[in-house]
Image (cartoon, coloured by chain):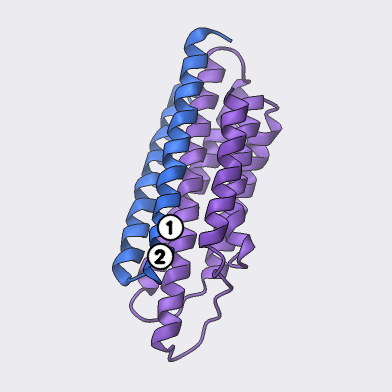
Amino acid sequence: MIRLKLSALALVAALTLAGACESIGPAVVTVNPTAEQVALDRDRAVKGLTAITAGLAIVRQSLEVADELEKNGALQTDVLRRMAEGGKSLAVVTDRAFDFIEAAAGGERINLQTTYQAVLLEFDKFLAIQEGAGHGTLTQLAKAIRAVLALMTIGGIS
Amino acid sequence: MNLKLILSLLSNASSIAAQAERGITALRSLAEAGGASQADVQQAIAAGRAESQKLHDVADGILNRLGGGQ
């Protein structure tokens, strides 16, 4: 039942968000941006940030599930430790991304693509650990994370 | 797998669905509005920071329990 819920969740999230994110495209840094360019960058920034935030939430849920599994002897302690360390690194990288985007606000064009690529790379590192754990529930949660993050590549933002 | 763990996993699945729904709702509103304002960017950053802090807290809690430190 959990697998069905998580699979359905990943599919619904991907299809619904794909429609809303169809205008996301790569950001090119230029000088003297027009008002329209600034507005487009803000649009892309919010959509990307929303996807990242949703991904972080599921990563947190994954850690909570992994923690319970380890306590019940269903997950190796070493795997949980590596997942927690990976989650910590991911949080640090996304914090830096938020700092960069916030500092660049105010009319300047920002290189969202580079910023998001760094974040997605860190997500990939975490997901490699989670998927390598070989536990069905963690694998399904990893799929949900990938489904949300895939929305950033559909429009070419990453 | 004991009942407590099953209930915990089901609870997590519902929470995940709720979080995804909030994300979907946010993006729909954004698409319908025809573009983000600076306030929207700030709000998105604030939401991201809040979620990142939760992740920090959970990760730190696990590492402290395992003796890995921060």
The residue positioned 52% from the left and 26% from the top of the image is: A65
Classed neighbour count for the residue bearing mark 1: other residues with Cα under 10 Å, few (<14), some (14–19), many (≥20) = some
Q: Is residue A60 visible?
A: yes
Q: Is A77 in front, or is A22?
A: A22
Tell me the number on the disc at residue B28: 1
Q: Toward the viewer: A15 or A98?
A: A15
Q: Are marks 2 and 1 in contact (CB under 8 Å)?
A: yes
- On the image, the x and y values in percent for residue A86 come to 56, 41
> For the residue marked with disc 2, what is the amino acid?
Glu
- Measuring from the top left, give residue A102's x and y in whole percent: 36, 67
Residue visible at 65% across and 37% down? A129
Q: Position of residue A14 (x, y in %)?
A: 58, 50
User: How many C-alpha atoms fall within 10 Å of the one at disc 2: few (<14), some, or many (≥20)?
Assistant: few
Residue bearing the label numbered 2: B32
Q: Amino acid at mark 1?
A: Arg
Q: Chain of mark 1?
A: B
Question: Chain coloured purple: which letter?
Answer: A
**In this image, A119 relative to B69: left or right?**
right
Relative image position of residue A109 (x, y in whole percent): 45, 80
> Extreme left residue here?
B39
Q: Residue furthest front?
A: B32
Looking at the rendering, which quadrant does residue A138 occupy?
top right
Q: Residue at x 58, y 60 (%)?
A: A152
Who is closer to the viewer here, B21 or A71? B21
User: Number of labelled discs?
Assistant: 2
